[in-house]
Amino acid sequence: MTELKFRSVAATPENENFEKLISRKTELYYRTDDIRSPFARDYTRILHSRAYRRLKHKTQVFFNIDNDHICTRMEHVAHVESVSSTVARALGLNEELTKAISVAHDLGHAPFGHQGETVIKELSKQYLNKDFWHEKNGLRFVDDIELLEDNYKRNQNLNLTYAVRDGIISHCGELDENGIKPRDISISVEDFDKAGKYQSATWEGCVVKIADKIAYVGRDIEDAVRLGFLDETAQNKLLRMAQMHDQKALNTTVIMHNMIIDICKNSSPEEGILLSPVLNRQLKEIKEFNYECIYKHKRLVPFQHYSKLVLTQIFEILLSFYDGRSTWNNLAENRAFMPKLVRSFEKWLARYCDVDVIPSGEYKILALECDNRKIYGKLETREIYIQAIIDFISGMTDRYAIELFNELIEY
């Protein structure tokens, strides 16, 4: 297992595609004394981004914002980083790239977990006739929305490397696949029009994809047990699955360990990143168990209704303010009734609209501090404005969405 079987195909300077993998849309500001690799620099840029910080208050599966021991989206990406970096290190892959993809892979997740994604998907289909999926939204966030200050306090886009951007959009962990191999690098990230359409362009991205599944199925079970979602029958069924490969296995930690070791033993450049047939079947059965006993549990139904109410009401209120060139005036007129919602959305627009359409004052000053791509232009159409609302909502934490909703029902 210490053979470093993938060293010759790792995303290192010896890789024939390395220049493509480290390429960026535009160059970053340069530091002559920087000792980090391009992928290590991406890793720290992600850690400093606001989207990453917000993961700590985004639902993974269970909406329980006051319980410190229930997994949040941030903890999930930490688990993925742990699993994937362990595998990458053992196989001889680029651990820095693997870590960067891991911490970035869920930046596009909506508030309220997959239920929030479902709500936004419905809104996007209804109003824009466009699909919404968190992998593509994650790419949109790192490409066009997340901003960091440069050396001169100018806000700029993240400009991550191609390999990390690719790992984000190709990470879909819902698909049951084994023997994962990289796609042809000539297939661009812009060619993805649905989740899971193509594999990653790197072996490191393939490792993150399988690590994502291992991480979430194990931790989701732990939380379900803690919250009393699993009755005695369900727990006995889980124990039988755990002991399929190891008769001494008693918990999900052992299941995850066995799968990590199994991947390292069985994967090869010829066969791909894979589990043995026995553990691949076990992973599939655990996923089916989770869907049957956890994700479709009747106790989640009130949360599903509540999250839809919160997000759709915020969307509809903001949409009601659109009126072409009068939109900024409409927002200003309603600021007194819902100050937190309106002011935060005005600031959002100020960062991404052309400077000359932004009212003078604090928002104009904010806009002038941003050297990013102006993805909303002059808000020329209702569709552009709707996309701005969807971006705004999809970046929220659970806590913030609830706070804004409460403001709506109190004014």
Image (cartoon, grey):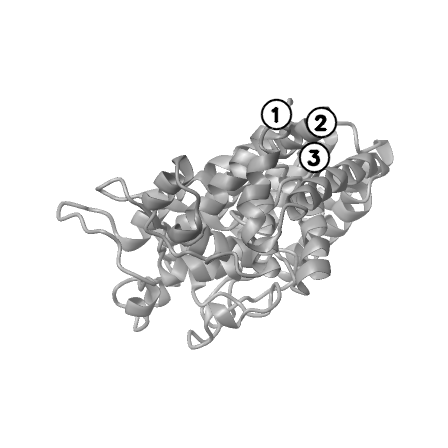
Residue at screen point 64% across, 23% down: 67
Using a 10 Å C-alpha cutoff, classify the residue at mark 2 as few (fewer than 14 neighbours), some (14 to 19) or many (20 or more).
few
The disc, 3 or 1, on the residue closer to the chain's N-terminal end is: 3
Q: Is residue 232 above or below residue 160?
A: above
Dot 2 corresponds to which residue? Answer: 226
Front residue of 26/44: it is: 26
Q: Considering the image in quadrants, where does the N terminus appear?
A: bottom left
Indicate the position of residue 133 as horizontal and vertical percent values.
62, 57
Question: Disc 3 residue type?
Answer: Phe
Q: Position of residue 270 (x, y in %)?
A: 47, 72
Distance from Cα at disc 1 to Cα at disc 2: 9 Å
Three-letter amino acid code of the residue under disc 2:
Arg
Circle 1 sits on which residue?
69
Residue located at (63% from left, 31% from top): 404
Q: Secondary structure at mark 1?
A: loop
Q: Is residue 175 positioned above or below 113 on the image?
A: below
Q: Which residue is mark 3?
A: 62
Q: Is residue 248 above or below residue 9?
A: above
Q: If you read the primary sequence from the N terminus, does the residue marked by circle 1 or circle 2 appear first? A: 1
Left or right: 186 in relation to 72: left
Kindly indicate whether the residue at mark 2 contacts the one at mark 1 (C-beta within 8 angstroms): yes
